[in-house]
Image (cartoon, rainbow, N blue to C red):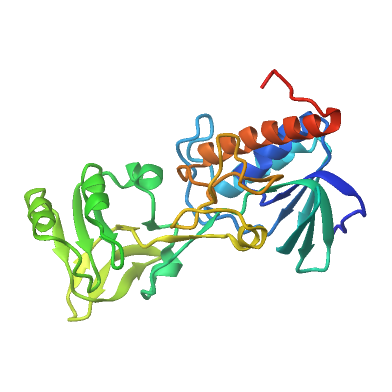
Amino acid sequence: MKLAEQKVWDVLIIGGGPAGLSAATVLARSRRSVAIIDEGRQRNLRSHGLHNYITRDGILPADFLDLVHEEIKQYPVSFFQGRALSVTRSEDQFSVSCADGNNFISKRLLLATGVSDQIPEVAGMKELWGKSIFHCPFCDGFECKEQHVGLYAQQLNGYGMALALKHIARKLTLFTDGGTYLRLAQKQKLEQQGIEVITKRIRKLLLDKGQLQGLELEDGRTVDCTALFTHHGISTNRSLLDQLGCRSTKKGAAITNRHQQTNVDGVYVAGDASIDMHFVVVAAAEGVKAAVAIHNDLLEKQYAEVLKYR
């Protein structure tokens, strides 16, 4: 493992997904010293393909990252594999400590730590995650357009997502796994749209050669289903955000301005950990916005004047 040089970086980026990599490219091209700390646990790595990103539609997430890493080799960006555990801010610098004992110091900090999906505790769910089980209709709905699609929504109301999926799928069934949150008007609307609602508890998913075939209910009944979406919530990877005192929404996303700046001076957030939509293309764009803001911020600090060309 590469050891961190004892130096003060212009920018330290935590997270090597689309947001972090886009920011690193812009900053390196602006002749900033940049280091990226990445665990290699991007949210979409198990996905069968990345979508809604022009010129890269359908590419495997791992292949997408390989392409970016190959492109970024021409710039002086330093990569460190590891997990950032703690961060402190002192005057105009940040100190980050990693699980492997590495320590980094930087003038500015970009957190691109993303989110983690809350995978339901149903037998077979983890095995099929990203293969036959998905969380985003925009990302994976088109590939399921001629299938009988299920929607698992146990702790969150699945009404709205059910209607969205019905627009895509040949047939849709909503599984609440014991949840009784639907209001009468919602039940009636779903029935009008031909959406069956099954409230019985789910015993397990039925698999064949690594693909979903259906669901088995607690009463022994089986329901055929070849794709399943979940509406079960996410959690923001916000340990470092909390340590720094960054403000967040009730759902845990970091609150930023249009330059991706947080309420903590020198701290920026881009990607799924921020308040915008969770798309790869959006994350990449936020990384670019953050990089430009960081570069200009450092220039203003260096020359002690407000630049006029933003």
Residue at the image position 74 percent from the left and 34 percent from the top: 297
Q: Decide which of 12, 225 is in the foreground and name it.
A: 12
Image quarter hosting the N terminus: bottom right
Q: Is residue 29 visible?
A: yes
**Residue 206 left/right relative to 30:** left
**Residue 308 left/right relative to 203:** right
- As drawn, 187 above or below 137: below
Image quarter hosting the C terminus: top right
Residue at the image position 67 percent from the left and 42 percent from the top: 21
- As drawn, 282 above or below 61: above
**Residue 218 left/right relative to 209:** left
Q: Decide which of 70, 196 is in the foreground and name it.
A: 196
Residue 141's spot in the image, x, y percent?
Answer: 33, 45
Q: Is residue 82 visible?
A: no
Q: Quadrant of residue 139?
A: top left
Q: Decide which of 67, 159 is in the foreground and name it.
A: 159
**Residue 108 left/right relative to 170:** right
Total number of numbered discs in the rendering: 0
Residue 39's spot in the image, x, y percent?
Answer: 68, 59
Residue 26's spot in the image, x, y percent?
Answer: 71, 32
Residue 20's spot in the image, x, y percent?
Answer: 66, 44
- As drawn, 288 above or below 226: above
Most extreme residue toward the top is: 309
Most extreme residue toward the right is: 6
Residue at the image position 7 percent from the left and 55 percent from the top: 188
